[in-house]
Amino acid sequence: MTTEPNSAESSLIDGFGRTIRYLRVSVTDRCDLRCRYCMAENMTFLPRSQIASLDELAIITERFIARGVDKVRLSGGEPLVRRDVIDLVQRLGRHVGSGLKELTMTTNGTRLAGYAGLLAGAGMRRINVSMDTRDPDKFRFITRHGDVAQVLNGIKAATETGLRVKINMVALKDFNEHEIGDMLAWCVGEGHDLTLIETMPLGDVEEDRTDRFMPLTVVKEMIEARFALSRDLNGTGGPARYWRVDGSDTRLGLISPLTANFCDGCNRVRLTTEGKLYTCLGHDDQRDLRAALREGGTAGLDAAIESALVTKPRRHDFRIERDGAPAIARHMSVTGG
Ligand code: SAM
Ligand code: SF4
């Protein structure tokens, strides 16, 4: 079963008049790393029987494209640990240029060296790679066992195939706060973009995030002491606010859900690896789109999507000062960061 893009389809508008154009798909909740702010060391992952097939994820995603979504990001968990993920990338890549403006991915980069050529060949132009530090010992600490050399190799391979790389770095107090300037200088030298992220209270990670919370308002002042920045208003409709590093190709993005709420312009929804639709990262409401598809085909799927959008919340309700307890029990890896 496929759902072909059709410009006559009505677009997706939520109860607050926001048009939905961006779908993030978590293709797996599993990961080969255990970043301390993201996962507990001993995570329980979904049983395989609960995971939607790649065909089901593709059908649902194609329905969103038919209804006006023009940007799709594959995420996870770590998207490149799902076997055959490249089949999904290639299938969705066929919509780039006809309905879809951009197909992209957020990855931890550990397997990127082996996949970069395939991703570029399937129509990806840009990719986000998460790397909180370039220091091998600190990287091993924050990921609980990762090897930053693999990530750096992946970034190199991606650049060589022509993929534009954006580094995602979660700003963490007493961990990487004094490396942020050097990371930005490195990105300028390599021609990458950099996005800094405030740690969000999602899922139990067996640690207290309050201790590590670093407001990006403070980080930005530190950066401006070293770099000249100009505001770049060509946003992606996403939560990041952007600046250009003067005299370079590098864009700096700041994602500050705690210190600057970004919900008024929200244009995104999230599909989990079980085929459930979350209309807000910060709320628990969801619709089971896979069940709707199985029971009612395309019409059932459309009805479920529309009823979910009517109840998309106005804004998230993250606060960091809850004695370290997560605001939302679900981990970011379930809904795709
Ligand atoms: N595994 C891939 C990766 O790490 O890029 C994709 C999934 S990961 C959940 C996506 C992004 O979310 C990463 O940049 C990660 O640093 C970020 N992230 C995970 N948990 C977070 C949290 N609690 N607060 C803020 N960012 C988080
Ligand atoms: Fe895995 Fe990405 Fe979460 Fe790190 S941030 S544990 S790489 S899903």
Image (tube, rainbow, N blue to C red):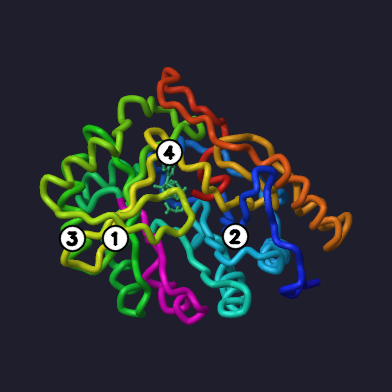
User: What residue sits right under mark 4 in the picture?
Assistant: 257
- How far apart in space, not on screen, are marks 3 and 2 (Cα)? 32 Å
Answer with mark 3 or mark 1, whichever residue precedes in sequence: 3
User: What residue sits right under mark 2 in the picture?
Assistant: 21
Q: Nearer the viewer, mark 3 or mark 1?
A: 1
User: What residue sits right under mark 3 in the picture?
Assistant: 186
Amino acid residing under circle 2: Arg
Callout 4: helix, strand or loop?
loop
- How far apart in space, not on screen, are marks 3 and 1 (Cα)? 13 Å
- How far apart in space, not on screen, are marks 2 and 1 (Cα)? 22 Å
Q: Quick check: 332 left or right of 166?
A: right
The magenta stretch is 109-131
**Residue 194 magenta:** no
- How far apart in space, not on screen, are marks 4 and 1 (Cα)? 19 Å
| Residue drawn at (37%, 34%) of the image | 259
Q: Nearer the viewer, mark 3 or mark 4?
A: 4
User: What residue sits right under mark 1 in the picture?
Assistant: 251
